[in-house]
Image: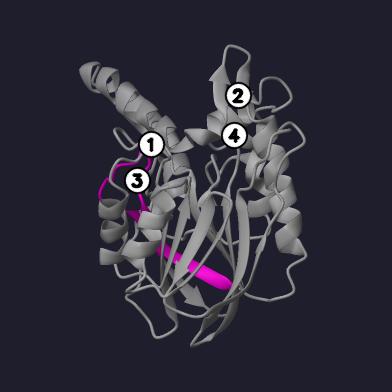
């Protein structure tokens, strides 16, 4: 846990594969605790403090309670709604019930797109869609445009990046919505070349962003610890509180649905109840201002 960056990524991207499930390595403490208790070994119990300390150093802060809502907070929801979702109207209503300022959606396909737009319209009069990603807002949106994050490995038409300016009461924010390519676990390791290439392109787009405040919402098909996403995570602030494992919805193992910010703080992230998707929605509170 403490030395995960030392695991090489050159062969099978083993480092990224390890980092995708890094919090779960804490289970080794439970596994080792049983024989330590059975043997009544004081030295073994003391030795267990080392992995406990490593886990707490990496993830303990995420479990602390967050501060209450403040006047400069923005509540956002991020959700991969799934192109196989059979209840888009119910999904849209569930997301709106959380009362966010912004809702970012991925895997928007016709005719479900029209259902999402109609259902969200009463409370979210502003929206922008590019390809299969979209953003709904309570605040005015301008300058919506496609962000090209299609990796070289994908030849067919592919549009999964969006950028728009959100005019909030506390200033303008450049909001990005993205859906990076999927990864696969194979016998040779983690197949993430396309995802990593797309993350690099998105990181470059955000680095070139002229607005100071930036918000990124999306299904990044990777955790915040995954070094394959470092072109993004090195430029953005990730959630300070909350684990919010979002995938798969039936038994969440990792948070691959992310909310990140620049010149702002993602103070807390949590999951919402399951919808008709194979992902859980996540909602986050973003504190606007310098960070």
Instruction: Kindly indicate whether the residue at mark 2 contacts the one at mark 4 (C-beta within 8 angstroms).
Output: no
Residue at mark 3 to residue at mark 2: CA–CA distance: 23 Å
| Disc 4, SS | helix
Q: Residues within 10 Å of mark 1 (few under 14, many from 20)?
A: some
| Disc 1, SS | loop
Q: Residues within 10 Å of mark 2 (few under 14, many from 20)?
A: some
Q: Earlier in the sequence, mark 3 or mark 2?
A: 2
* Image-quadrant location for residue 207: bottom right
Which disc, if any, is residue 280?
A: 3
Which disc, if any, is residue 190?
A: 2
Quadrant in which the C terminus is drawn: bottom right
Residue 252 x, y percent position in the rendering:
34, 37
In the image, residue 201 above or below residue 196: below
Q: Earlier in the sequence, mark 1 or mark 2?
A: 1
Q: Nearer the viewer, mark 1 or mark 4?
A: 1
Residue 103 x, y percent position in the rendering:
42, 63
Please tell me which residue is depicted at 71% across the width and 20% down the height of the picture: 11
| Disc 2, SS | strand
């Amino acid at each position: 846990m403490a030395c995960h960056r030392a695991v090489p990524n050159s062969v099978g991207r083993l480092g990224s594969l390890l980092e995708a499930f890094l919090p779960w390595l804490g289970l080794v403490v439970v596994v080792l605790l049983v024989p330590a208790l059975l043997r009544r070994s004081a030295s073994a119990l003391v030795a267990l403090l080392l992995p406990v300390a490593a886990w707490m150093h990496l993830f303990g802060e995420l479990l602390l309670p967050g501060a209450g809502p403040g006047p400069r907070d923005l509540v956002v929801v991020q959700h991969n709604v799934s192109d196989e979702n059979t209840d888009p109207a119910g999904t849209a209503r569930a997301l709106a019930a959380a009362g966010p300022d912004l809702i970012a959606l991925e895997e928007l396909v016709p005719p479900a797109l029209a259902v999402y737009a109609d259902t969200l319209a009463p409370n979210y009069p502003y929206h922008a869609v590019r390809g299969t990603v979209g953003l709904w807002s309570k605040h005015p949106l301008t300058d919506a445009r496609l962000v090209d994050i299609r990796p070289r490995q994908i030849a067919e038409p592919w549009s999964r990046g969006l950028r728009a300016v959100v005019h909030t009461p506390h200033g303008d924010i450049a909001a990005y919505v993205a859906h990076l390519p999927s990864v696969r676990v194979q016998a040779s390791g983690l197949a993430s070349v396309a995802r990593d290439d797309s993350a690099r392109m998105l990181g470059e787009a955000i680095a070139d962003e002229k607005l100071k405040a930036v918000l990124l919402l999306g299904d990044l098909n990777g955790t915040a610890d995954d070094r394959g996403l470092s072109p993004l995570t090195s430029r953005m602030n990730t959630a300070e509180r909350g684990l919010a494992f979002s995938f798969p919805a039936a038994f969440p193992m990792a948070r691959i649905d992310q909310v990140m910010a620049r010149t702002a703080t993602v103070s807390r992230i949590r999951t919402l109840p399951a919808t008709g998707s194979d992902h859980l929605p996540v909602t986050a509170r973003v504190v606007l201002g310098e960070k």
